[in-house]
Structures are given as C-alpha cells and as structure tokens.
Amino acid sequence: MAKTEPSMDAWLAEARASEQASKCGMFLIHNGVVRETAKAQVREGQDMPEVAQVEFSYDAEGLEAAVAEALTWEGVYYVRAWLNEGVLDVGDTIMYVLIGADIRPRCIDALQRLVGHIKNDLVVEKEIYA
C-alpha cells in the first residue's frame, strides 16, 4: 500500500529554519510521478502498452547512506528524501527529494546526481500494463 505523502510546504519551512539554511542560496525539489508511458517507450522508442500501475520498492538503508553522502558534496547543506512503496497508480508520487545548496549549479548538479543514484541503484520498479 502506498504511503502518505509529506507536505512540501512543511519540508521547505523546515529546511529554511535549519541550522544550515543561511548557507543555502537555493532549494530544489524533485517530485517523481508514475506516468502512463512505459520507460522503454520513452527511453528507447519501443512501442509499448500504457502503464496502469507500478510496483515500487527501495533499499531504505541505501537511501539513508545516499542522503548522508550527498551532504558531503561541495556546497550541499541540506538534503531530504522520501520514497513511496507498494503498488502505485498513474499520477501517484514515487519520490520527493529536496536539496539545499549554496549556488544554483551545485544545487542542480546535486539533485540530478542524487536522484540518478536513487533511481539507478536503490529502487525496484515493475511496470504493470493496462
């Protein structure tokens, strides 16, 4: 069963109230969502049926380690991540990742790097077709 989603307003308020907030010139949020277009169609151009649901799970310890590692990257001062789990419908949130960094290029790069690591190494997704 899918988990209850966190509030991004609350996350940003907490981030801006954190001890490290004064070092952050930018906060970025990634909101990954289940889409109806299959991965193989989007990435490889294969003709695929529409996705109805996704079975989603992740390595919780690996996620905790990835967040801790991201906090060691140059210019990154705030990191938070939440991943859903279970059978998710099209439109359901897969994940939220929040990064706070000193300057825009570092914030963008850190978000891309962390989300890439999560998606490539820490999650298991199985598309269920309509």
Image (spheres, rainbow, N blue to C red):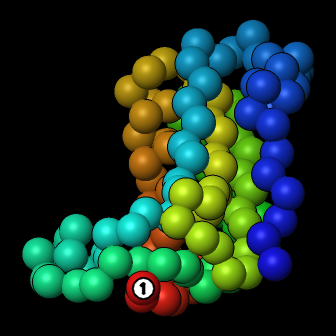
Whether residue 15 is visible, yes or no, is no
Question: Can you say whether 71 is above or below 32 in the image?
Answer: above
In the picture of the structure, the residue carrying the numbered disc 1 is: 130
In the displayed structure, 94 sits above or below 121; it is above
Relative horizontal placement of residue 56, taking residue 2 as reference (left or right): left
Whether residue 126 sits left or right of residue 9 in the image: it is: left
Residue 104 point in image, percent of width and height: 44, 21
Give the total number of marks visible in the rendering. 1
Furthest-front residue in this view: 130
How many residues crowd mark 1 within 10 Å: few (<14), some (14–19), many (20+)? Answer: few
In x, y percent, where is residue 2? 78, 71
Q: Position of residue 11 (x, y in %)?
A: 80, 32
Q: Residue at x 49, y 18 (%)?
A: 103
- Which of 6 and 1 lies nearest the eye of the viewer? 1
Give amino acid for label 1: Ala
Quarter of the figure with the N terminus: bottom right
Can residue 106 be seen from the camera position used here?
Answer: yes
Find residue 99 and report its image quarter: top right
Q: Is residue 112 above or below residue 13?
A: below
